[in-house]
Image (tube, grey):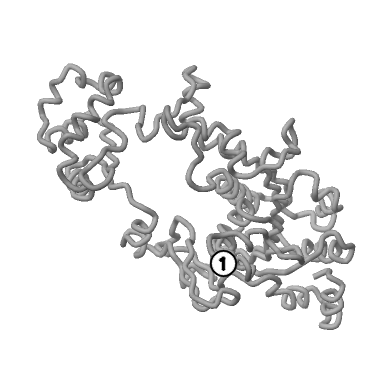
Amino acid sequence: MTYNQQKPSPLEGIRILDLSNVLAGPFCCHQLAHMGAEVIKVENVRGGDLARQLGVDPELNKRNMGISFLAQNAGKKSVTLNLKDEAGKALLKQLVATADVLVENYRPGVMKRLGLDYEVLKAVNPKLIYCAISGFGQEGPWVHRPAYDQIIQGSSGVMSITGDADSAPMRVGYPIADTIGGMTAAFAIAAALNAPERGSFIDVSMLEATIATMGWAVSNYLIGGVAPTPNGNENLTSAPSGTFQAEDAPINIAANKDEQWEALARHIGRPELLEDPRFLNRELRKQNRLSLKAEIETVLVTRPAREWAREMNRIGVPAGAVLSVPEVLAHPQITERGLLATFGQVPGVERDITVVRTGFKLDGKAPAVEDAPPILGQHNDEIYTDLGLTGQQINELKDAGVI
C-alpha cells in the first residue's frame, strides 16, 4: 500500500519471508510491512506462531488468534510449512528464490540442523538478506542458552538499574528487549536493502541491541568509572527532575536548566528556594534532591497534576502528568495522528480490532497496511499457486501435512 497518493511506499516490491515467532522477529517484520514490503509469514503446520495462543483473551487464544499475535501481524500473509519434511524444505527454497529477505529467530543452530541455514539458502538466492535474531548472537559462551525477554532484561543490566534502592532489580513493564531486538533488526535490514550489492547475513543479538540503547548509563561506567545504580523516578543528571506528587496523581517535571528551575520556583510561589544554600547550583540541587523534592511537593499537592502540567509547559518548564495506558490512547495527541488502526470484523476474531501502527509519519502520513492479521495458512493457495503448484498438488501437500 502507498503511504500517500504521489509516492510508492519505500519498501514496495520487496518480499520478506517471516519465519519468526512471538515478538522480536514478528515486530521487526511488522515495521517492514508498514513500510510497504510484502511479508509472508511462514508458520508451522501445527498451531503456527506461538503468539497465536498468547494474550489476555482466552477465547481468542483458543481460536489461534491471540492478542499477542494480532498486535504485530497486520498486513502480513500467512502460509503453513513443515520445515522438517523434505517437501517442505524444497518449498521454502522455492520461496527463498523469490524473496529479498528472510527473518528468523530460532535458537542458533536450528536452521543448520534443518539444512536451511544461510549458506544453503544463499546458494539458492545469492542476493538474499538473511537476518537471524537470537538472544545472545550466533557465537559466544552463551550462544546456546534459551532467551526470553526477561532473561535478556536481567542479563543486560536493565533490571539492575530499574526501580529504586528498595525495589531493584525490577523488570521493565513491557518486553523491551524483544522490542529493541526487533527494531534493531528492521533497521539493519533496511540498511542492507540499500547496499550497492545485495546479499548479507545479519546477526542480531538481543543482549547487545539492548545494551546499545543504554548508552548513557553504560558510558558513565566505561568512561566515568561510576557503576549505574537504580534511582527509581529520579533523573540523576539534574534536579529538580523526576516524578512529584500532585493533588490527584503523580507529575513528571524536568527542570534541567537553571532558567527552568528559576521559573518553576517562582511559579509555585517559592522564590525563596532560589536563595537556599542547599539549592544554589545544579550540583548542590543534585546532592540535596530529596529535600528539594519535599519542598516542591508541599505546593504541588494543593492542585491537580494536569493543571500544573499545563501551566508549567506554558512558562517553559517541561512537565506532564503520569498517564495510564487507556488515558494516553484516548488522548487527541494519539487519536489524531494515525497511530492506531482499526480493522473491521477480522476473520477468526469476528469483531473489530484496533492495533498500533508505527511511531512515525512519512510526508505527513502514518504508514499503514490494508489487511488485518491473517488466520493460519490463509494465503496458502495464493502463494503456492504463484510458485507454480497446481490445485491438486496443493491438496496433496495439505493431506501429507507438509502445508
Q: Residue at x 43, y 59 (%)?
A: 361
Instruction: Give the left or right position of residue 30, taking residue 16 as reference.
Output: left
* Depicted 20 relative to depicted 260: above or below: below
Q: 10 Å neighbourhood of mark 1: few (<14), some, or many (≥20)?
A: many
> Where is the N terminus found, in terms of image quarters?
bottom right
- Looking at the image, which is closer to me, 212 or 196? 212
Residue 15 percent location from the top left of the image: 67, 64
Q: Residue at x 83, y 66 (%)?
A: 91
Q: Residue at x 28, y 25 (%)?
A: 289
Can residue 63 be seen from the camera position used here?
Answer: yes
- Looking at the image, which is closer to me, 379 or 175? 175
* Depicted 150 relative to depicted 218: above or below: below
Amino acid type shown at disc 1? Ala
Residue 21 percent location from the top left of the image: 67, 56
* Depicted 362 relative to depicted 311: above or below: below
Instruction: Give the left or right position of residue 40, taking residue 33 as reference.
Output: right
Rendering quarter of residue 41: bottom right
